[in-house]
Image (cartoon, grey):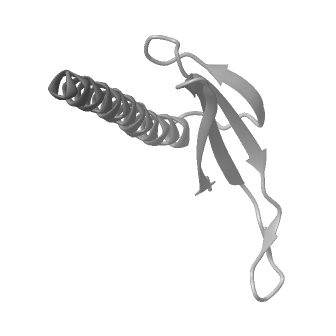
Amino acid sequence: MLALTIFCVVAVALTSAVHQIVDTSILLRDESQVRLELQNLLTESAGAQMKPGKSEVQVGDGRVHYEKEIRVIQAKTATGVVLPSLYAIIIQGSWKASGQERSAHAEVIVYRP
């Protein structure tokens, strides 16, 4: 009887550990995929026509919601000369994993002479 009790406790602990490993693996896979998609979206956006504003972007299977924002940046050089055609591209991704809201973002500044 004691051996059966010990076996059951070990089995429950092992099942719990495997469940945590699977959850962590899924979370890491999702975060890695989101980072890759964020980089791809930044690269695509930097090469496209710059139109300031916010827009939704559909990528992949739709589990992750992406939003792209392009802003005009007013910057000056050290001598006070205003730099025209300077844009900030911000991509925000949000998704739900393990019952929690997750998000990631990436941004880049692009100069278009």
Q: Residue, x 60% and y 23% (percent of image)?
A: 99
Of all residues, the one furthest to the bottom in this rendering is 79
Placement of the C terminus among the 4 image quadrants: bottom right
Picture quarter containing residue 16?
top left
Q: Is residue 63 above or below residue 39?
A: above
Q: Residue, x 60% and y 34% (percent of image)?
A: 102
Of all residues, the one furthest to the top in this rendering is 61
Whether residue 71 sits left or right of residue 19 in the image: it is right
Placement of the N terminus among the 4 image quadrants: top left
Picture quarter containing residue 61?
top left
Q: Residue, x 46% and y 34% (percent of image)?
A: 34
Picture quarter containing residue 14?
top left
Of all residues, the one furthest to the front in this rendering is 1
Q: Is residue 70 above or below residue 16?
A: below
Whether residue 23 sits left or right of residue 88 in the image: it is left
Of all residues, the one furthest to the left in this rendering is 3
Q: Residue, x 44% and y 42% (percent of image)?
A: 39
Residue 13, percent from left and from top: 31, 32
Nearer to the camera, 22 or 18? 18
Q: Is residue 76 above or below residue 31?
A: below
Nearer to the camera, 19 or 15? 15
Whether residue 35 sits left or right of residue 90 in the image: it is left
Residue 80, percent from left and from top: 84, 83
Residue 109, percent from left and from top: 62, 57
